[in-house]
Image: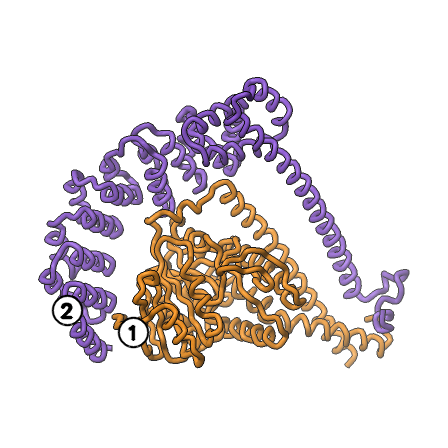
Amino acid sequence: MGSALHQITEIASWLFLIYGSVICTGYLFSAVFSLIEIRDYKRRNNFVDETAMLQSLNLPAISILAPAYNEGLNIVENVRSLLTINYPSFEIVIINDGSKDDSLNKLIEEYELEKRDVLHHSFIPTKTIRGIYKSRNKAFKSLTVVDKENGGKADALNTGINICKNSIICCIDVDCILEHDAMLKLIKPFLNNEKKVIASGGVIRVANSCVIEDGRIIEVKLPEKFIARVQVLEYFRAFLMGRMAWSRVDGLLLISGAFGMFDKPTVIEAGGYNTNTVGEDMELLVRMRRMMREKNVPYSVGFVPDPLCWTEVPQSWKVLHSQRNRWTRGTAETLWIHKKMLFNPKYKILGMLSTPFWFFFEWLAPLIEFSGILFFYFYCCLTRSTGSSF
Amino acid sequence: MTPNLLILFDGFSNFRDWAWIMKINVLIISFFLFFTICLVTFIIGIRLFKNFRNSKKKKQENLLIDFLNSYLFDEDFEKQKEIENFKQNHLNTALEIKVTIKEILQFHKNLKGESATALKELFSQLQLDIFILKDLDKNSWYNTARAIYALSELTIEIPVNKIEPYLNDQRDEVRQQSQLYFLKTAKSNPLQFLDKTKRPLTTWQQIYIENALKNFYEGPIPDFAQWLNHELISVVEFSIRLISRYNQFENIPKLLPFLNHGKESVKIETIRSLRKLGYEELLGLITPDFEKENLLIKKEILKTIEQLGDYNDLQKIRPLIAADEWELKIKYLNIERFFLPQKIEQINIESMLERKLKI
């Protein structure tokens, strides 16, 4: 019995040790890769000011899709902020996902909207559209509001994809605050690449406690609450270390749902956002990448290490818990849906590195690390009771 | 430390007798502790260095603002003496030189005419061009791109063979800056560098060149047809586009063969160009093959009908649109609305019926 226990603890000790070593090595490598990538990016951009390109009429038009559900409190201001985006040609599609509050009425009133019969086709199946609204006022001609039955964020985005006119789409959260040149920076990977670019994303920063005026960040401040401060650090780590490194090795699996740009034909071909998962942003990118790989089409996914979008993070444990619960479930569901990719050399870096890393070190990490702590505690107790140090 | 752990450790004097897992733990802890201390020290070190560097930079910037303002606008300023003085006392380190170049470029961007020329003269009097040329020959792409950028901003001409190799450099940034250099320093034929280009132009580079051509080049506009037979498809597409942008109607006959080009993107660009040039015979050339074309070309043909054709041309296309070509159908109906605004309601009803029947 004692010998069996000894063997079990020996094996467990080795497993935890290997796990710890691999995760630390992984972080070390990602730190080095992201350092190289960020330095490269900084060098590429620190002597040329490309904002002059914003005057160019040759930049492709973008459709900005923003789903809204019960956002009545700030919807008017948020849409106004989106309308002031600095980019030569864009349309904004606000998708009212069956809000129960007065979001739609507020928009109709403020932006002089009227119902129009806009011809469209459901390339991706969605819930019923109740109406499509356009403004009578030419100042808001780039605004389209779609009113539909409630179907969740993914369904709302799919509706936007069906309705919008342009072949490059930018999916954002309606309450996000964008940097003045965010669109230009995000579209650059699409235009400056010899391969087909299917998606690009950027760094998202925490806006809590920052001074905001007219939909622009005026002063960056550290959040007052501890829980939000921790998330500032976490966002830096996730975006500047994690995603930059994955981008360097072309293994990026996630472009944040809060702000990402996609090639619409590829999104439609892949089937649009999955309405059956809570991690629709990650699932879409994985599915798009998987499709491109299976079709054997050379492609790329861009990532811009500049802060492009600012968002409010949860300030209470309860909201944070539900957000993290959603994220973790989203990761698990995506990995389950695409389990075929795991350790599959056909998918190259995605199959051999990205998906295993996400499986073992993103999704399972809290469980394994907690088990490791428990194991260590019981190991100590066991040693005390047997009086030996193995 | 809890009694449990004490048993495991059994005192540091008996390290050899410790459980192996504790030994490894202690080793790893020691390694990470050492690593953390090094990292924190390093971060503090670079922070201090950066603060020191920034204060020097600020000092140099302030000095330069006064110096440049006096040089440009103060008539009593003893130029030669002050330039020598500045060179001797404030251009001794790489940082001072870099800040000076940056500041002069900034001033140059905001000034025109005599002041801009004076800044260019000052640049060479301070022998900053020598520093730039040294930078150009360095092996790092970053220094090269930055040096070419400075040369093109100030339109400082240097022997062509010094920049030409960079037109086909591995790095996008270097290629882009060298293209810009040739464009900004050209007196005529600003896109001559395309003859030497062997790497495809990205869309971004094309937009960049077009922008620079519009905003910086002041000489005569070249005949873009000279690159229609370039070996790179991207250059061919670019020249086709520029022909229409600059309304070179005389090149329409040269564009026509490209309607039968094997590459889809060239064909699309040609249709767009001829459409923008208002070539009326275009529809007769592209509509007969409508059925055989792919979706993107079909969309371009529909757009052309909208702009150059009439309702009859549109109706001829109707039977050629397949039942599952929804994107084309929507486009078709929108153009139908455009031609028959009085029948919008009827078109909507028809389209709705179509949807109900076929989806």
Q: Residue at x 19, y 50 (%)?
A: B275
Given residues A41 and B222, the one toward you in this image is B222
User: Is disc 1 placed on a helix, strand or loop?
Assistant: strand
Question: Percent from the top left, x then y, of residue A361?
Answer: 60, 66
Mark 1, chain letter?
A
Q: Which label sits on residue A115?
A: 1
Q: Quadrant of the N terminus of chain B?
A: bottom right
Question: Percent from the top left, x then y, of residue B108?
Answer: 47, 33
Question: Percent from the top left, x then y, of residue B196?
Answer: 34, 33
Q: Residue at x 31, y 44 (%)?
A: B234
| Disc 2: which residue | B342
Q: Quadrant of the C terminus of chain B?
A: bottom left
Snapshot quadrant of residue B192: top left
The answer, for residue A234, to whether it is visible in the render is yes
Mark 2, chain letter?
B
Q: Residue at x 40, y 79 (%)?
A: A98
- In the figure, the shade used to draw chain B is purple
Given residues B47 and B32, the one toward you in this image is B47
User: Is disc 2 placed on a helix, strand or loop?
Assistant: helix
Q: Is residue A86 left or right of residue B347?
A: right
